[in-house]
Image (spheres, helix red, strand yellow):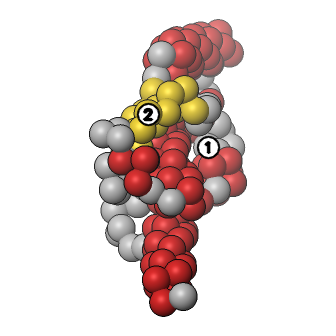
Amino acid sequence: MSQPMEDRVAQAMAHLKAAEAAAASARAELDTASAIARSADRSVRVSVGAKGELTSLEFLDGKYRTMAAAQLSAAVLEAANTARAEMARRVVDLLDPITRMTARGAAPERMGVDWEAVFGSLIAETSEAKGPTAMSRLRDEIVEDDEDDKGRQGGA
């Protein structure tokens, strides 16, 4: 037998209130959220906000003074992308249950949000299989180019 209409409306209202409360809680948490990361060479530390915006950039221990411009820029990008990836993972962890809660009744294959479409490669960079990322390959290429340049300069 089907439920009386009043019961279904009451259940839907309770579900809506729970979703609204979860969304408000998530918004409050994200309003103050930040992620901090250092470059692999420990020369740069960055902080990003919940939207992935850079909120602070620090050069550590004066290492930047002896770094080539390309090395320093690679370190900044690496740290920023690491922090952005961490923040993206936290946003997904926080919002995915809410989006699934509000997608109730949708076809299972369309439930929730396509986080890969929202965050692109940042989500993949937070996976457990830590193979070389695009940023680590770029850093390696820059270091190799700098070493090649130093070798040519030393031989001239």
Q: Where residue 37 sits: x, y (%)?
A: 39, 42
Quickly name the residue at label 2. 58
Quickly name the residue at label 1. 112
User: Above or below — where is 93 with respect to 74?
Assistant: above
Q: Is residue 85 visible?
A: no
Residue that appears at 34% across and 62% down: 128
Which quadrant holds residue 45?
A: top left
Residue that appears at 36% across and 67% down: 130
Which quadrant holds residue 40?
A: bottom left
Closest to the observer: 141 or 83?
141
Left or right relative to 129: residue 121: right
Q: Where residue 89 sits: x, y (%)?
A: 46, 44
What is the quadrant of the N terminus in the image? top right
**Gap between marks 1 and 2 measured at Cα:** 37 Å
**Numbered badge on residue 123:** none
Amino acid residing under circle 2: Glu
What is the quadrant of the C terminus in the image? bottom right
Q: Where residue 102 sits: x, y (%)?
A: 62, 30
Q: Where residue 76 sits: x, y (%)?
A: 51, 48
User: Above or below — where is 132 with respect to 123?
Assistant: below
SS assignment at label 1: loop
Residue that appears at 46% across and 23% down: 33
User: Above or below — where is 71 with respect to 56?
Assistant: below
Amino acid residing under circle 1: Gly
For disc 2, the neighbor class at 10 Å (few under 14, some 14 to 19, many from 20) is few
SS assignment at label 2: strand
